Image (cartoon, helix red, strand yellow):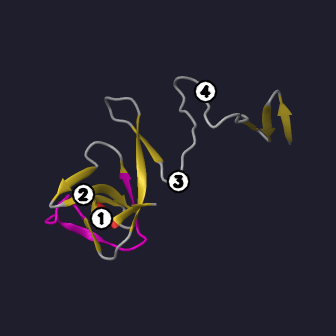
Amino acid sequence: MNYSNGGFIVIGKKILFPIVSSIIILSASVPVLADVYKDDVINTYSTENSDKSSIRTTTYEVIGNNVRFRETPSLSGNVIGYLNKGDLVNAGSYEGWEVEADGYTWVHCFSYKYELNGWVSKDYLIEY
């Protein structure tokens, strides 16, 4: 049974709170809901000695074929695998996520294809 009860919508046994704006703050200890765009993924993590933190990440599309996915940000870095045009990787925006080495800007990213973290030259990536 569906009905409205004092501004709340009740569907069966679930109560839905109406969203008045794109941001809702329920209390200081509850996460904030906000607009997140397709290229903005927010990952939340916590460590033993810290509170939860958020890192904004960006999804990139590979624009070349046989692009080397490396263990380290270097032309001499071990090759984990090869990425092809259209493959997607996800990179963070934290300190050290981009490194200059061997004349390239290397991006530390997660490969959906290999389900591993590694490094790719930014020359072969565009924001998705």
What is the number of callouts on the image? Answer: 4
Who's the residue at 53% across and 23% down the image? Answer: 28
Can residue 86 be found in the magenta stretch? yes
Q: Tell me the magenta residue range.
A: 70-91
Q: Is residue 18 above or below residue 101?
A: above
Query: 118 or 35: nearer the eye?
Result: 35
Judge left or right: residue 32 versus residue 111. right
Query: Residue 112, located in which quarter of the rendered image?
Result: bottom left
The numbered disc on residue 123 is 1
Identify which residue, 58 or 44, lies in the foreground.
58
Q: Nearer the viewer, residue 72 or 75?
A: 75
Q: Position of residue 122 (x, y in %)?
A: 30, 61
Q: CA distance from mark 3 to mark 2?
A: 24 Å
Q: Which mark is residue 26?
A: 4
Local packing at callout 4 (Cα closer than 10 Å; few below 14, some 14-19, many 20+) is few
Q: Measured along the vertical axis of the image, is residue 21 above or below residue 73? A: above
Q: Which residue of the protein is positioned furthest toward the bottom in this rendering? A: 65
Q: Secondary structure at mark 2?
A: strand
Q: Earlier in the sequence, mark 4 or mark 1?
A: 4
Going from N to C along the chain, the mark reached first, 3 or 4, is: 4
Res. 45 mark: none
Q: In terms of sequence position, does the residue under pointer 3 or pointer 1 come before the other?
A: 3
Q: Identify residue for label 3.
A: 38
**Residue type pointed to by label 3:** Lys
Q: Residue shown at 33%/76% (left/top)?
A: 65
- Which residue, given by chain and number where applicable, does mark 2 sit on? 105
Camera-nearest label, 3 or 4? 3
**Residue 76 among those drawn in magenta:** yes
The Cα atoms of the two marked residues, 4 and 2, are separated by 41 Å
Q: CA distance from mark 3 to mark 1?
A: 22 Å
